């Protein structure tokens, strides 16, 4: 139990009187306000992180290149290609559902749509999803600054649909 000195002034004032019901109402209201503030901070951090990651993916897609062997390279680094990014392929020799997405994004950023599609059939869809995150996350951050906490479920379902599409594409690739 918290001491009266650590409680808000309204709660102390309510406790000084004999009206215990008012004290409970004030305590619940303060708990709700604190929970709303915590949720607002969580959402701001989440949307800010997602916005930063999406911006980084887009900038890197334009900054990186594909070398003659089709590997990703950074022209500002002294070596010809970056190490493979897929842990599944490196450890087990099996492509994962996302294998080829980096190269597909880089080819798409360079304007080579056919190569992008060849590298990963859903690269264009994933790139579109990443690009659409920028206005969405910016809007959500704007709404949070205005004090609006909106918890819609469609982003969760959209993310699940993208993951399902990646897994289905991966499964199909075993038969092609």
Image: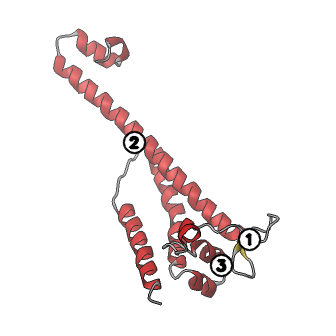
Asked whether 162 or 18 is in front, the reply is: 162
- Alpha carbon distance from label 2 to label 1: 42 Å
Q: Quadrant of residue 42?
A: top left
Mark 2 touching mark 1, by CB under 8 A?
no
Residue tagged 1: 81
Residue 79 position by quadrant = bottom right
Residue at x 38%, y 47% (from the top left corner): 149
**Secondary element at image label 2:** helix
Residue at far bottom of view: 176
**Left or right of 131, for residue 166:** left
Q: How is the image coloured?
A: secondary structure
Q: CA distance from mark 3 to mark 1?
A: 15 Å
Name the residue located 57 percent from the left edge and 58 percent from the top edge.
53
Q: Earlier in the sequence, mark 2 or mark 1?
A: 2
Q: Give SS at disc 1.
A: loop
Check disc 3 and report the residue beneath it.
107
Q: Could you tell me residue 141's position as x and y percent?
A: 49, 51
Looking at the rendered structure, the secondary structure element under dot 3 is: helix
- Sequence-first disc among 3 and 1: 1
Expressed as whole percent of the image width and height from the top left, the position of residue 100 reads: 58, 76
Task: State which mark lies toward you, 2 or 1.
Answer: 1
How many C-alpha atoms fall within 10 Å of the one at disc 3: few (<14), some, or many (≥20)?
Answer: many
């Amino acid at each position: 139990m918290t001491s009266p000195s650590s409680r808000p002034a309204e709660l102390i004032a309510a406790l000084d009187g004999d009206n215990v019901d008012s004290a409970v109402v004030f305590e619940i209201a303060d708990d709700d306000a604190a929970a709303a503030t915590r949720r607002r901070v969580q959402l701001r951090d989440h949307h800010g992180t997602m916005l930063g990651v999406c911006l980084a993916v887009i900038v890197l897609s334009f900054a990186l290149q594909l070398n003659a062997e089709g590997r990703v390279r950074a022209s500002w680094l002294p070596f010809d290609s970056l190490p493979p990014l897929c842990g599944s392929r490196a450890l087990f020799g099996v492509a994962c559902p996302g294998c080829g997405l980096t190269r597909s994004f880089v080819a798409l950023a360079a304007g080579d749509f056919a190569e992008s599609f060849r590298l990963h059939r859903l690269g264009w869809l994933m790139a579109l999803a990443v690009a659409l995150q920028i206005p969405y996350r910016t809007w959500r951050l704007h709404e949070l600054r205005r004090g609006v906490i909106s918890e819609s479920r469609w982003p969760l379902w959209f993310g699940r649909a993208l993951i399902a599409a990646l897994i289905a594409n991966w499964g199909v690739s075993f038969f092609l």
